[in-house]
Amino acid sequence: MNVIETKEILYEYPDGTKALEDVNFKAESGKIIALLGPNGAGKSTLFLHFNGILEPSSGEVLVNGRPISYDKKELMKVRQEVGIVFQNPDDQLFAPTVMEDVAFGPMNIGLSKEKVESRVKEALKRVGMEGFEKKPPHHLSGGQKKRVTIAGILAMKPKIMVLDEPTSGLDPRGASQIMRLLYELNEEGMTIIISTHDVDLVPLYASTVYIISHGNIIKEGSPQTVFSDVETIRNANLRLPRIAHLMEILNKEDHVSFGKPYPLTIGEARRKIREQAKD
Ligand SMILES: Nc1ncnc2c1ncn2[C@@H]1O[C@H](COP(=O)(O)OP(=O)(O)OP(=O)(O)O)[C@@H](O)[C@H]1O
């Protein structure tokens, strides 16, 4: 079942910029889906359609098979179902303390004080930010802010979590920790949709990949399918995962081949190299 689906959506900003054109996007329940695209391709604009922050100029957005209705009450429901973590934490964090920030969503849907407190505690624990409750968000580091924004969405217990570049600006360990958390949440049944420039992360976590360029989806499929289309990847100003790039160089320049499609992760490459060494 598709928990989110866009049908031929087109979006034009008030200044006339056409940011999306005829975008068909599907997120199947329980998957991790990655949206890849260069700067300005339309990733954030597309994501803002998933819980009705933006309304398409034409076309339709469906959540759990139902077209989004843009009246206030209905939108509240959609936003409990679909949580969006913005690219820039400063666009999301606004309360005087971490505690109040994470509590805002659960309070807004009328949960009791005890329930709100337990949700805040649980969410901050999940992202490794317990002990920061009293801190003002603007005193946190970039990585810590990102974790708090994720906690704020987790506290709403959405079934679908949409994260705009969740690892941008994080050190390698921080990026791995966030991806590990998303992986665990997905194992527990949450559908995860991320946008990223980090092509090395994609084959490790995502089962479906979409490539967006100039407001159009130009490729979709498994990481193996998408990264086999090297021309499309490069034309979209993206690159192959480093491992696949190394295999391509070995193949083309040194005539050493570990077979196609190229392995995309260290694990896959290691397996292929070991197999070949045995022969
Ligand atoms: N508020 C706005 N008003 C007018 N044009 C906008 C606005 N926000 C974005 N755009 C334009 O819409 C297009 C898509 O932008 P968007 O932010 O969705 O891209 P993106 O893929 O998320 O980029 P990045 O990777 O740099 O975050 C760009 O041409 C951008 O300049």
Image (cartoon, rainbow, N blue to C red):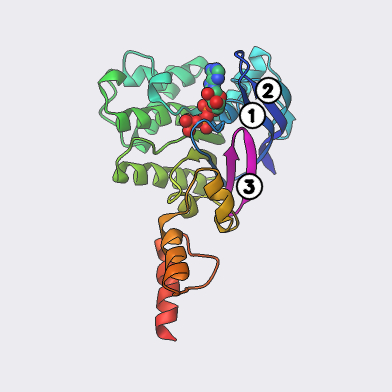
- Give the mark nearer the N terminus: 2 vs 1: 1
Q: Amino acid at mark 2?
A: Pro
Lateral position of residue 98 relative to residue 228, left or right: left
Instruction: Report the residue at 68% width, 30% height from top.
Output: 21
Residue that badge 2 annotates: 56
Residue 150 image position (x, y, % from top left): 42, 31
Residue that badge 1 annotates: 20
Q: Kindly state the secondary structure of the residue where label 2 is placed.
A: loop
Q: Amino acid at mark 3?
A: Lys
Q: Kindly state the secondary structure of the residue where label 1 is placed.
A: strand
Q: Amino acid at mark 1?
A: Leu
Residue that badge 3 annotates: 219
Instruction: Report the residue at 43% width, 64% height from top.
Output: 249
- Give the mark nearer the N terminus: 1 vs 3: 1
Q: Is mark 1 within 8 Å of ligand 1?
A: yes
Q: Kindly state the secondary structure of the residue where label 3 is placed.
A: strand
Between circles 2 and 3, the one closer to the viewer is 3
Q: Which residues are magenta?
A: 209-223
Residue 234 image position (x, y, % from top left): 52, 49
Distance of mark 1 from mark 3, alpha carbons?
15 Å
